Image (tube, grey):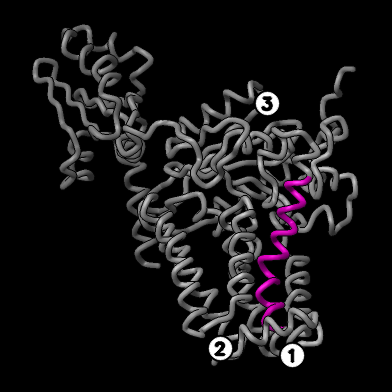
Amino acid sequence: MANRKGSIERSAEETNAKPSLAHTLRELEDCMDLVHRTFPEIHTHVLYFGHLVNLQQLNGDVISPLLHVRMEELPLLFRQSQFVPAADAKELITGILDGKAAIFHHDLAYLADVYGPEARSIQSSETESVIIGPHEAFTEQASSTLSMIRKRVKSSHLKVIQLSVGEVTKTNVYILYIKDIVNMSYVRELIDRIKKIEVDAVYDTNMLIQYIDDHPNSIFPQYLTTERPDSAVSKLVGGRMIGFTEGSPSVFSAPSSLFEFFSSSDDYYQRWALGTATRLLRFIAFVITILFTALYVSITTFHYEMIPENLLITLAESRSKVPFPPVYEALLMEATIELLREAGARLPNKIGQTIGIVGGIVIGQAAVQAGLTSNILIIAVASSAIASFVVPSYVMSASVRLIRFGLILLAGFWGNFGITAGVAWIVVHLSGLTCLGASYLNPVAPARFIDWLDVFIRAPFGLLKERPTQAEPANMRKTKMRK
């Protein structure tokens, strides 16, 4: 508390202090990356961080004019638009830290916006790959993210609000929405939550949304994140808000529902029948990945009568050499699969793919031959692992994998009753989740059947005449199609 009070007092002092070269150098002392250029003929100094500025723009807007100006011409030069007077010391130092150049002449100080650090070029998303449609993805540059959205939404109704989070990092946060479509009560609620965040640092969008969750202890993600501009724009047009932080390629949308995590951009770029079939396949994969291994444990432990007679003989032979109960056997193999998955994700791409494929085959075959597991469990675990990859959202896929372990334990202790109790708890938990106060299970709870045309199926565009009701947009109706 004392440290925060001291920080507030220093901030007040900086706000009241006049901008000066000496004060600025004291505040930025021991910063070896600070560039200090002097122009003794005209008694002028320039301060900037070399790695934050665009050197070509700096030379053209600031350095070159100062090199060729005479003392009596300085007042006229500083009236040009690129030189903005600094009101106080805090604004001056913040501007330098934001990548601007500070120009000092006697008791006057100006800021020139020459921000332009090096950044990676626009590439395709590695976590949200599509077969049909645009392949470009957001980068860590906020200006690049905004430009890709503006390029797709050429409307004066698209509004951008900038906030700052983090006492130390002062990370820029951007909130975007389309006026006259979005529900402004959600915009105000989101802005209020972000303003109330009091932490030293926020590094990424995925870190930010954990501070504004309605239910921070839930394992389910409550904000949909994406790296694709087309997906972000579809949320804006659908009446939602999007937001992101400087330095992060991820954009979140709000309010979000569970069913959005099973939707992909591919659904809208294919014929509606193919998009519907693919979406239904994802829901089936969701059921398989959380229940398949748990059902194996339940049936082989308590409910042999559910197995067909011919398969029962095969299963008995397969398990005859296994010394462990089915629940230990399943947990061992599931943990092994997760280790292989994590190792494949952390290693370089070529090596990671080799580890995943070869490791899975070798370990699975060796485990069966050693009598540590049965062939049928290998099939169940592999099917569950493959089904988890069908879920388009990585964060939702990770949550689903965690649920699977819980259901396996319940199945090992109480059989089918344990699975039923676990599934019931999941449904009750999901029913209680909200995102900015909106139901997480919308449009199932509350039931809004018109929205099902773009949830469980992907209906033809001619039938998708209204925006999703979860966000309660100010304008429900989309533009009518001309016949």
Residue placed under numbered mark 1 in the picture: 302
Write down the region rendered in magenta.
277-298
Sequence-first disc among 3 and 2: 3
Q: In terms of image quadrants, where is residue 103?
A: top left
Residue placed under numbered mark 2 in the picture: 322
Decide: is 2 above or below 141: below
Left or right, residue 97 beside residue 376: left
Crowd rating for badge 3 (residues with CA inside 10 Å; few <14, some 14–19, many 20+)? few
Give the alpha-carbon distance from disc 1 to disc 3, as whole Å. 61 Å
Q: Please tell me which residue lies in front, 250 or 335.
A: 335
Amino acid bearing label 1: Phe
Left or right, residue 201 beside residue 257: left
Q: Residue at x 65, y 35 (%)?
A: 177
Q: Residue at x 14, y 16 (%)?
A: 42
Answer whether labels 3 and 2 touch (C-beta < 8 Å): no
Decide: is 46 above or below 130: above
Residue 62 image position (x, y, % from top left): 25, 18
Sequence-first disc among 1 and 2: 1
Residue 475 falls inside the magenta stretch: no
Residue 220 image position (x, y, % from top left): 64, 63
Sequence-first disc among 1 and 3: 3
Amino acid bearing label 3: His
Overall secondary structure of the magenta section: helix
Q: Secondary structure at mark 1?
A: loop
Image quadrant occupied by the N terminus: bottom left
